[in-house]
Image (spheres, helix red, strand yellow):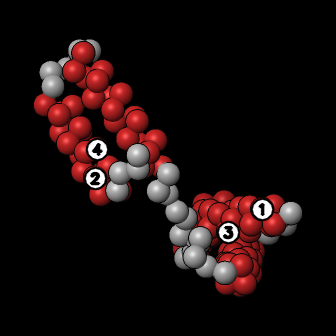
């Protein structure tokens, strides 16, 4: 008994509105709505598909290599800039100057790049383990 995803999301929205309209505190109505909401969320999770499900392994591997190269270049640029401004271990430069210089050069958001790399690696690992 699978309902289309549109019906699920519509009902989840209705439940959210009904929950917001209820007075604060526990009640039989709130419990019933929360129970239904949880069941609908479990059903909706079955529709989940990853952004990479339709992409080939070759495409994912190429993106992974590109992201790793970009990450390496970004880190190299940061380190090179900081050490060129006297941030090496043998210099008397102030830590504040080094920190500001490093922040100024950090154009890439490494946390986003690292998260995407991890996601692609997980997807590729899952594909490889499903083949064996």
Q: CA distance from mark 2 to mark 4?
A: 9 Å
Left or right: residue 37 compared with residue 29: right
Q: Quadrant of residue 114?
A: bottom right
Q: Residue at x 41, y 46 (%)?
A: 1
Do the residues bearing badges 1 and 3 touch, measured as CB atoms within 8 Å? no
Q: CA distance from mark 2 to mark 3?
A: 31 Å
Q: Residue at x 18, y 39 (%)?
A: 17
Q: Which residue is mark 2?
A: 7
Q: Position of residue 53 (x, y in %)?
A: 59, 70
Q: CA distance from mark 1 to mark 2?
A: 32 Å
Q: Could you tell me if residue 73 is visible in this image? A: no
Q: Which residue is mark 4?
A: 12
Which of pointers 2 and 4 lies earlier in the amino acid sequence?
2
Which of pointers 1 and 2 lies earlier in the amino acid sequence?
2
| Discs 2/3, front | 2
Q: Which residue is mark 1?
A: 130
Q: Secondary structure at mark 2?
A: helix
For residue 67, above or below residue 30: below
Q: Residues within 10 Å of mark 3 (few under 14, many from 20)?
A: some
Which of pointers 1 and 3 lies earlier in the amino acid sequence?
3
Q: In the image shown, does 93 or 53 lie closer to the viewer?
A: 53
| Discs 3/4, front | 4
Q: Residues within 10 Å of mark 2 (few under 14, many from 20)?
A: few
Instruction: Indicate which disc residue 16 carries.
Output: none
Left or right: residue 88 compared with residue 57: right
Q: CA distance from mark 4 to mark 1?
A: 33 Å
Q: Secondary structure at mark 3?
A: helix
Which of pointers 4 and 1 lies earlier in the amino acid sequence?
4
């Amino acid at each position: 008994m699978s309902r289309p995803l549109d019906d699920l999301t519509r009902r989840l929205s209705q439940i959210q509105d009904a929950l917001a309209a209820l007075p604060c505190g526990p009640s039989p109505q709130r419990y019933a709505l929360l129970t239904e909401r949880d069941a609908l969320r479990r059903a909706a999770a079955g529709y989940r598909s990853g952004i990479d499900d339709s992409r080939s392994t070759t495409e994912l591997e190429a993106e992974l290599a590109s992201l790793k190269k970009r990450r390496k270049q970004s880190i190299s640029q940061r380190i090179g800039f900081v050490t060129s401004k006297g941030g090496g271990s043998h210099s008397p430069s102030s830590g504040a100057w080094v920190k500001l210089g490093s922040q100024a050069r950090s154009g890439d958001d490494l946390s986003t790049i690292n998260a995407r790399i991890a996601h692609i690696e997980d997807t590729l690992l899952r594909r490889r383990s499903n083949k064996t």
